[in-house]
Amino acid sequence: MVADTRLSTKLWAAANWFLIGFFLLNLLGMIATVVTSSFATRWLGTWLPAGWTTRWYSAAWAEFQLGDVLSVTFQIVFLVVLFSGLLGVPAAYALARRDFPGKKLVMLLFLLPLLVPPITFGIPLATVLYRLNLAGSMSGVVLANLVPTVPFVILVMIPFIEQIDTKIEAAARVFGANTFKLFIHVLLPLLMPGILAALLLVLVRTIAMFELTFLTAGPTSQTLVVALYYAVFAAGVRAVQSIDAMAVVYMVTTLIWLVIALRFVNPTQIVARAKR
């Protein structure tokens, strides 16, 4: 393979690397500013704070009731992940294995919540949930988040299911396996990498989901990202450092789950499986 040594190609590559570097530099700068502020005793008009302290974290924990917020966040995330798997995996199997009239239309309907901005369908969805007296509770938040996460599980799982040879399932049935045993002893071990991939990505997605949670959450059903929004824009005077400390808690929580997800999931493998 001969490398392209033309000047225009080199300039284009240099421009791309410059833009990527500029983006990463700004991103790291914003994160560093928030983290530094969360440990600063006072930071006005200088390159570095006048002093360092960790008291803003304890202040944020008490003022914003982060213990309760984190507990609610993890409960909502667990329920969304659980029901997304229970609903999404069987639906993905049916769509991967069965052909029926209107299948493409059904697939399009499943993908719509992933293609359009959440705020587009979030407002009418919240209206329906309020009429059913579900909004403002944990149940309403879970139901709202299931709208995009179930299609996401279906989208991720279909390539994993399609790569399993149907002869394996036929052989299991020949040896007397019913549908339940076929799923537990044959399909589940083969699909476990895909299920882990889908559910871990759903977990990270749900923690970061703001629009649907904001529209349907009540005072006792706010996730961490919604509580952070209220902390920033609520009336009253609050120390910037305590809000930044809360933002750092949110970033660290999301980062931990993202690292765990990437430990078990390689996004390039999902793409490669989808192309088979």
Image (cartoon, helix red, strand yellow):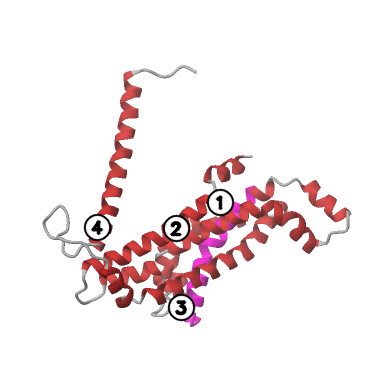
Comparing 245 with 206, the one in front is 245
How far apart marks 4 and 2 lie (CA) works out to 20 Å
**Residue type at mark 1?**
Phe
Q: Which residue is mark 2?
A: 256
**Residue type at mark 4?**
Thr
The quadrant holding residue 274 is top right
Comparing 26 with 239, the one in front is 239
Image x and y of residue 187, in percent: 73, 55
Q: In the image, which disc is placed on residue 264?
A: 1
**Residue type at mark 2?**
Ile
Residue at image x 37%, y 73%?
66
| N-terminal-most mark, 4 or 2 | 4
Residue at image x 77%, y 64%?
180
Q: In the image, which disc is placed on residue 36?
A: 4
How far apart marks 1 and 4 lie (CA) works out to 31 Å
Residue density around tag 4, few if under 14, some if 14–19, many if 20 or more, within 10 Å = some
Residue at image x 49%, y 80%?
134
**Residue type at mark 3?**
Ala
| N-terminal-most mark, 2 or 3 | 3
Comparing 121 with 215, the one in front is 215
> Is 92 positioned to the left or the right of 176 in the image?
left
> Is 34 positioned to the left or the right of 218 in the image?
left
**Which SS class for mark 2?**
helix
How far apart marks 2 and 3 lie (CA) works out to 29 Å
How far apart marks 3 and 1 lie (CA) works out to 34 Å
Q: Are marks 1 and 4 in contact (CB under 8 Å)?
A: no
Q: Which residue is mark 3?
A: 135
Q: Which residues are magenta?
A: 130-159
